[in-house]
Amino acid sequence: MGSLSAARAELVHLERRELQLLQELSDVRKALATQKVVLAELVKTSAVPYIDRLPNELLAEIFLLLRDKRTILASVSRRWRAVLISTPSMWNVINLDADRNCPTKLLELYLERSRQAPLTVIIGSITPGLDVIIPHANRWHTLRVISCIRQTLDTISRLTFPSLQYLFLYGGGLALDDVLTMRSWAPSLKRLELNEWELPLHKPLCEIIPAETLEELSITSGGHDWKFKKDSMHFPLLRRLALNTRDPIPLLEAIVAPKLASFCFTPNRHKESVSKIFTGTRMKFNNVSHLALSSGRVVDQGTLLLVKLLCQIFCGIRHADIDVNYVPTLFTYYGQRPIDHWTCIESLDIRNLTLISSQPFRYLSFWLEKRRRLDQRKLHVKLTHERVTDELVMLNTSGTLFRELQECCASLVLDRIPASPQMYSPTSADSLLSSSPTCSAMNV
């Protein structure tokens, strides 16, 4: 009897103990949950932001992408301000056109913070701060004169810029005869852009520009009555030539550029007659592997004749960028196609497609199919849409013509062309469908 009472008493004790332990466990769990919340808040408030974990060098590279926001960036934190001030390349662009009202002391501060970094200088129509940056002419790496002020050009031509490698000059129709020779004040120039200048009539071009050092030359000019001696201009290092003029042939006949690899032509709006023949040797530009033919504002018969002639002159082309306006002329169905002169062609970029007509695709597909039948190399083709239209025009990539085009190419890339893989069948093959007032699809 006594043992039974003892057993019952022990059971009651254990049950009470169980309740106590369960209550303690509940209390511990509540305290644990509370502590986790407290810890999470502490971590949240004390954690270092990811961007502040970046090293100063990487932070400076990011700031360079936001150079025009440097005032705002400097107000974020002491560290950001210190990084900005200690990064010379944040201060080495001096824009006297945009900052025409910039106080002299602020320009001097920019120059001080840029230390010995190469300077990029932009000069417009008003140049109140030019005197401040002239003492640093030895650091000028890039110079853009975007407004034709004769006084500014005279000031520049009296200085020497030993480190200047890129020069953009706007001439406003002046002749280069009126400019003092760049050879004397920009002896290390590698890239030159002459915008709205007339080439010299009384001096050889090579006596004005530093032809020995140039690697890139771009000229935008009316090109009125260009007359040069054949092979009279030597550019030993020139790799890229871009001409925006009515007739590039006289200049092409005059230059000798054994390292020339890229030529870009854009016809301007003038109506003068153009050259019909090229008197240079067929091998003169054999090293040119890239040709870009832009259409400019107007494509007339003279321009089309020039484009045909350029295909013969640059017969060693491997990579070509062609405006869609030239496709009917270069890829004609009949006779010898001008593009057939490019026996080494590897890639082709057709630009400014509008998708309003399937005709460019037909010309291109016909020519590529012929190459395939002749067992010639398949090309890498890129179709680029660069014009903005009110309508949403979509390319039907399931169309027969598009599939044939794709089969004839080593690769076919659509750049900025809205494409639809499944469109309902048109009433006539390769027609433009209008599925709504604002949406249409071309079955190519």
Image (cartoon, rainbow, N blue to C red):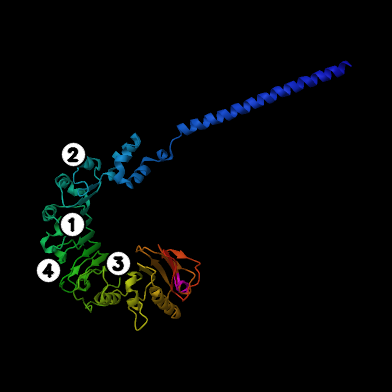
Which amino acid, mark 4? Leu
Majority secondary structure in the magenta region: helix
List the residue tagged with mark 1. Answer: 187
Q: Given this view, does label 4 or label 2 mark the residue nearer the observer?
A: 2
Q: Distance between the residues labelled 1 and 2?
A: 31 Å
In magenta stretch: residue 124: no
Where's the C terminus, which quadrant?
Answer: bottom left
Among numbered discs 2 and 3, the one appearing first in the sequence: 2
Which amino acid, mark 1? Pro
Q: Can residue 283 be seen in this view?
A: no
Q: How dense is the environment of label 2, judged by Cα within 10 Å: few (below 14), some, or many (20 and up)?
A: few
List the residue tagged with mark 4. Answer: 201
User: What stretch of residues is rendered in magenta?
Assistant: 402-410
Task: Answer above or below: position of 61 versus 278.
Answer: above
Q: Given this view, does label 3 or label 4 mark the residue nearer the observer?
A: 4
Q: How dense is the environment of label 1, judged by Cα within 10 Å: few (below 14), some, or many (20 and up)?
A: many
Q: Given this view, does label 1 or label 2 mark the residue nearer the observer?
A: 2
Which amino acid, mark 2? Lys
**Residue 310 in which image quadrant:** bottom left
List the residue tagged with mark 2. Answer: 105
Left or right, 396 with respect to 222, comes to: right
List the residue tagged with mark 3. Answer: 262
Left or right, 204 with respect to 352, comes to: left
Q: Given this view, does label 2 or label 3 mark the residue nearer the observer?
A: 2
Residue positioned 35% across, 67% down in the render:
352
Residue 5 locus on image (x, y percent): 85, 17
